[in-house]
Amino acid sequence: MTPETAPRPETPAETAAPVIRARDLSLTFQTGDGPVHALKDVTLDIAKGDFVSFIGPSGCGKTTFLRVLADLEQPTAGSVTVNGVTPEQARRARAYGYVFQAAGLYPWRTIGGNIRLPLEIMGISRAEQASRVARVLEMVELDGFERKYPWQLSGGMQQRASIARALAFDADILLMDEPFGALDEIVRDHLNEQLLALWARTGKTIAFVTHSIPEAVYLSTRIVVMSPRPGRISDVIESPLPRERPLDIRDTPEFIEIAHRVREGLRAGHEDV
Amino acid sequence: MSDVTAAGAGVGRSAATGWIGRRVVALGPVLAVVAGILAIWYAAVPPMNIHWAASRAARADVAVSVPEGQSIRSAGAWALVLRNPGLIPATYTQDKPRLPAPHQVAAELWSTTAGPPVTSNKSLIHHASITLGATLLGFVFGALGGLLLAVGIVYNRVMDASVMPWAIASQTIPILALAPMIVVVLNSIGVTGLVPKAVIAAYLSFFPVVVGMVKGLRSPSAIQSDLLHTYNANGWQGFWKLRLPAAMPFLFPSLKVGIAASLVGAIIAELPTGAQGGLGARLLSGSYYGQTIQIWSALFAAAILAAVLVGIVGAIQTATLKRMGFGR
Ligand SMILES: Nc1ncnc2c1ncn2[C@@H]1O[C@H](COP(=O)(O)OP(=O)(O)OP(=O)(O)O)[C@@H](O)[C@H]1O
Ligand SMILES: [Mg+2]
């Protein structure tokens, strides 16, 4: 047992095979205006229990990288494994939950019905469905909204519902594409705390896309800074912050120091262009 | 306590007047259009029927004024009307007018629906129900066929490329030319009565359902279907849990068009068969014997029937979409 306050504990899992392993991964979209190099030679390992944030200007391939991991996009070169197998096999094994950039709720299903969708598809019993729906709704603080329809909720609440939907089937990997982008600062802080608590409690491996430097620094064990055209990794920053992170850690010198480094990395990426 | 009830009553009252107010606003333009159509219709009756009224008057030795050097036959309709205003009332009461007046049609509609027993050959309800039977049977098969074709088109690449052009081509053939052929062919193999009419009704009603459902089944967004992909959902689940419910808002407008087309098909199918009953038979016998009032009342019966059918589909639409939670 390593103490929670130790700087980035070396768990045995980290020395084992990485959960996500990308080698020289490239993806070029063929469009009408010629090829778009969304990803170029991306090499990255994500260990079990890591919380990795991806940050970078719009169009640098953050969403594309997550979609490759989720078998929603096929790389044009290089290799990638998830849990040691191909993304397709990982998807078939339902290894990950994916939170999309937009909520993507089904308008004909209630909030509860939307969260039940993956559970129905995975053949989970009705009783178990009900208890899981109640649990994840509470987690994102939407209890009481189970019977409401998506159009009756604000955009932020819809996004929280989509997070609840991804949490409902309890996959070991969470792929989250700007899940809190549409939320106000206070709710965002709160959900950040909740997400950290969930991560600490469950030991999930999380890949998290964001445009917010403080959010990336607050949440992550590692921050991947990307730059566009072609989309590539320009810096990987290991966080020295402890795993236990109260909100006011954001005022400590260490925090500000990392945030500074991330900002420098982003700037460098912009200057390249 | 009394304050509360008073306030409650006030809310109730204003809500009620608000509802009535909205109804009046919605009804106002409709009534204005109806009034305008009636006015034009009434104005058109004298010139349409004046020739017959004038020759009848002439035979009865009533003086009819015609323009210099012209006969009643060659005189213009408006000239006759303006020169013989005394003949105008007679244009509204003829037995076989070229253009019957609205009240004549209304009276005929009333006497043929409320008068004879519904089983009688004189009852318009009897004829309407015969047409309705063929319409509904054809609609059910047309809609189901359209639905299956749409599913095939959406799920099968070959069908996608091959079926749609044929479906479109099928609708460009004039139904008036095709209907007698279908009826004759079916009659020759011993299929008569309801079925040939339903076949033509189905032929007209499947197309809007195909078009609407193809669009509806393809309406889910990329995120909505990517989501199912990440759950490793199978094709059935994709159909039942995503494509079909997403298509519902597209289905009902197609069904409305389809059921109206089905009615048209059933009526047209009644024309060539020399059918004993049905609104189409009524139209045909009316035109054989110059019974214009009968023709017009059959036309109105068909229009009312279409409005009722479309209205029923609309009510089912509202109820279904509301139950499914499609907001506003
Ligand atoms: N399906 C596609 N077809 C063609 N080009 C695409 C496709 N998807 C993404 N791209 C291009 O790939 C590049 C990377 O896109 P991606 O969505 O991964 O960016 P992102 O980093 O997520 O941006 P944002 O922060 O705005 O979400 C962009 O230039 C985009 O235009
Ligand atoms: Mg993105």
Image (cartoon, coloured by chain):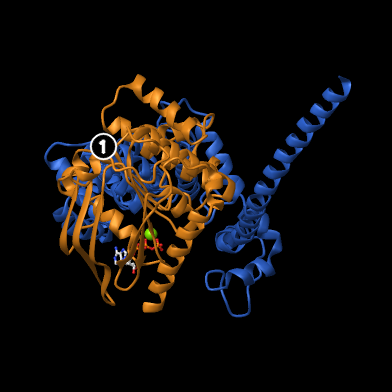
Asked which quadrant contains residue A41, the reply is bottom left
Q: Identify which residue is drawn at 49% across, 28% down.
A: B116
The 10 Å Cα crowd at callout 1, few under 14, some 14 to 19, many 20 or more, is some
Q: Identify which residue is drawn at 37% across, 36% down.
A: A167
Q: Identify which residue is drawn at 53% across, 39% down.
A: B109
Residue in the foreground of this view, choosing between B50 and B8 = B8
Q: Colour of chain B?
A: blue
Q: In the image, residue B61 lies at what x, y percent?
A: 63, 60
Q: Amino acid at mark 1?
A: Gln
Can you identify the residue that label 1 sits on? Answer: B237
Instruction: Give ligand 2's quarter of the image.
Output: bottom left
**Does residue B294 appear to the left or right of B233 in the view shown?**
right
Could you say whether the residue bearing mark 1 is in a helix, strand or loop? helix
Seen in the picture, residue B325 relative to B120 is either above or below; the reply is: below
Give the chain letter for orange: A
**Does residue B247 appear to the left or right of B187 in the view shown?**
right
Q: In the image, residue B274 lies at what x, y percent?
A: 28, 43
